[in-house]
Image (spheres, rainbow, N blue to C red):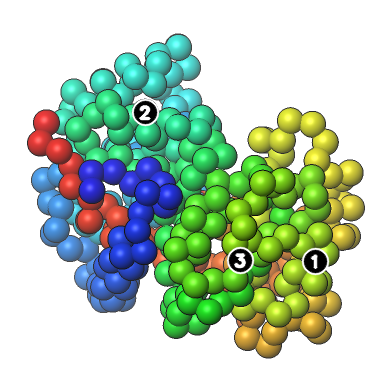
């Protein structure tokens, strides 16, 4: 494949190949010398039109571990602020003969647009509310590491699902395995047209009490047009995951969050920092997973 735009277009076999490759890279990353010469002489550019902490830094580290030359494109100091279009920005970058373009953009479809207009391999690092494929892949990798399988698991995704590209990519990925997927949250934040394989819960306890995995999402205020919840304080009161939940959750449940998390809104500090939380493991696994994706893509000859 030339590009990774979404999980939707991947088969279960594609996903397993990426996860197996990520496992091999994670072993490399545990060595003293963490760098491999695999992509020496090739160039990657990270084009982030939206803020990011985890995705941008882990892509940069993944690229450097693969010996790529790396350019980081800062929108705020670029000619985008003077009105340069995405197309002209792309053509300018392409003139440098880059091999990989990692793009995050507020518009759903931006990554696909870029992929269709460049011979470079394009990796979607999040486009609007559409997809965030490498997040779903690193989430699956993290679940596999802890649980040893994806098949047979009950996975509850809790919170602002309609505005979440992470939830969408996770739904596509988990649906390719034999999983029991639940969407849990207030009706205003859950899709009206959820696929048939998803169970809907408007009650937190009922939705998560027998789950093997609880994935929390932040309230994405930047994408909400209108009032979806009365207030963040009330959201925490009703939907926030607090330590009291450990009295009814499974003993071996794992708590996940793609970040950035808002403590005191969707998660309490006690839960975020508990032994059941694998949130920092997810961050760590972003590097090996993104190395695998870059390694497995093949740019077209320009
Ligand atoms: N999970 C995620 O996309 O985090 P960042 O926005 O910090 O990259």
Q: Residue shown at 26%/20% (left/top)?
A: 92
- For the residue labelled by badge 2, is the local secondary structure a helix, a strand or a loop? helix
Q: CA distance from mark 2 to mark 3?
A: 31 Å
Residue topped by disc 3: 181
Helix, strand or loop at label 1? It is helix
Q: Which of the marked residues, 2 or 3, is nearer the chain's N terminus?
A: 2
Look at mark 2 in the image and give the residue it sits on.
113
Q: Residues within 10 Å of mark 3 (few under 14, many from 20)?
A: many
x then y, percent, for residue 60: 34, 49
The tag on residue 154 is none
Where residue 284 sits, quadrant-wise, is: bottom left
Query: Looking at the figure, which quarter contains the C terminus?
Result: top left
Sequence order check: which comes first, mark 1 or mark 2?
A: 2
Q: Is residue 64 visible?
A: no
Q: What is the spatial separation of the Cα atoms under label 1 and label 3, in whole angstroms?
A: 14 Å
Asked if marks 1 and 3 touch (Cβ < 8 Å), the reply is no
Q: Nearer the viewer, mark 2 or mark 3?
A: 3
Residue for point 36% across, 64% down: 12
Disc 1 and disc 2 in contact, CB within 8 angstroms: no
Residue 206 placement (x, y as % from top left): 80, 72
Would you identify the image quadrant in which residue 115 lies? Answer: top left
């Amino acid at each position: 494949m030339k590009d990774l735009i979404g999980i939707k277009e991947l088969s279960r076999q594609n996903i397993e190949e990426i996860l197996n490759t990520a496992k091999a890279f994670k072993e490399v990353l545990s060595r003293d010398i963490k760098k491999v010469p695999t992509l020496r002489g090739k160039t990657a550019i990270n084009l982030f039109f939206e803020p990011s902490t985890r995705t941008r830094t882990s892509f940069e580290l993944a690229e450097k571990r693969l010996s790529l030359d790396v350019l980081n494109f800062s929108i705020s100091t670029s000619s985008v602020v003077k009105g340069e279009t995405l197309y002209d920005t792309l053509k300018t970058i392409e003139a440098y003969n880059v091999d990989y373009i990692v793009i995050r953009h507020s518009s759903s479809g931006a990554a696909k647009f870029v992929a269709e207009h460049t011979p470079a391999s394009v990796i979607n690092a999040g486009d609007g509310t559409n997809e965030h494929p490498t997040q779903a892949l690193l989430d699956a990798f993290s679940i596999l590491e802890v649980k040893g399988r994806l098949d047979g698991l009950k996975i509850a995704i809790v919170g602002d699902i309609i505005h979440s590209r992470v939830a969408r990519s996770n739904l596509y990925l988990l649906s390719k395995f034999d999983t029991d997927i639940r969407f849990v949250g207030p009706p205003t934040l859950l899709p009206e047209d959820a696929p048939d394989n998803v169970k809907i819960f408007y009650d937190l306890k009922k939705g998560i009490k027998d789950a093997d995995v609880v994935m929390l999402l932040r309230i994405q205020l930047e994408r909400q047009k209108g009032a979806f919840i009365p207030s963040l304080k009330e959201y925490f009161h009703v939907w926030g995951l607090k330590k009291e939940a450990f009295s009814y959750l499974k003993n071996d449940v794992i708590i996940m969050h793609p970040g950035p998390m808002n403590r005191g809104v969707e998660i309490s500090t006690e839960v975020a920092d508990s032994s059941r939380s694998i949130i920092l493991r997810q961050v760590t696994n972003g590097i090996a997973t993104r190395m695998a994706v870059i390694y497995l893509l093949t740019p077209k000859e320009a």
